[in-house]
Amino acid sequence: MRIAYAVPLLIILTAFATSVYFYPQMPDKIASHWDAAGNVNGYMDKTIALFLVPVISVLLFLLFMALPRIDPKKQNIGKFRKYYDRFVVLMIAFLFYVHVLIVEWNLGVAFSMGQMLAPAIGVFFYYIGILTGHSKRNYSIGIRTPWTLSNEKVWDKTHLVGGRLFRVAGVIAIFGAALPQHAFLLVLAPIITASIAVYIYSYFIFRKLKSGRKQ
């Protein structure tokens, strides 16, 4: 079995086992959502809350395993498949980490949710930057704008810049662990900024290449 299948499946099984083990110890209503200041502002029935993330993990795992098989440009995904497989493992591990934080919080462990999430989100987006920098044109994975999908040079240039920006955003997000009062801002602002920047950049690169052909 490919490690890209075995490791995520093991993590998912561990997530389900964690939910089953701690189920009797949980209150009927479980804290499941926090605001930017780290205060709980949402609760769910414990059955739903304890199994929601594991079920989402299964669905995402199945989706991300299917994409390389059904994408019209699946041969291009094969060119960066090892980075993609690592992304799938990291994504499932990230969801498991979130699941563990929710369980710990509801067991009475006191911590800042934003502070604990910041480094994990930072690492996750840093690796998204690595994946982005190595991705080849396809319809499922990467920065899919009308301009990157229509032109391979635009795709390559956009993903080169986008990979760098997402890595920088990931590093900034990690600092949220050291500055809990600003964790939400340090995580959200760089990621949103990078996403908007690469979208705009892809358009201008497309226009530049198009005008160059006309000359």
Image (spheres, helix red, strand yellow):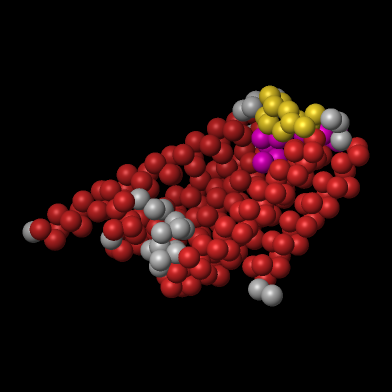
Image position, residue 178 (x, y; %): 66, 38
Q: Is residue 69 magenta?
A: no
Q: Could you tell me which residue is drawn at 24 percent across and 53 percent down?
A: 206
Q: Could you tell me which residue is drawn at 55 percent across and 50 percent down?
A: 125
- Whether residue 1 is visible to the viewer of this picture, yes or no, is yes
Residues 162 and 5: in front is 5
Q: Which of the 4 quarters of the picture holds residue 109?
A: top right
- Whether residue 95 is visible to the viewer of this picture, yes or no, is no
Tell me which segment is drawn in magenta. 106-117
- Taking 14 as reference, is 169 above or below it? above
- Taking 86 as reference, is 146 above or below it? above
Q: How many marks?
A: 0
Q: Residue furthest right?
A: 24
Quarter of the picture containing the C terminus is bottom left
Q: Is residue 107 magenta?
A: yes
Image position, residue 184 (x, y; %): 59, 33
Q: Is residue 1 left or right of residue 69?
A: right
Image position, residue 58 (x, y; %): 67, 54
Quarter of the picture containing the N terminus is bottom right
Residues 95 and 178: in front is 95
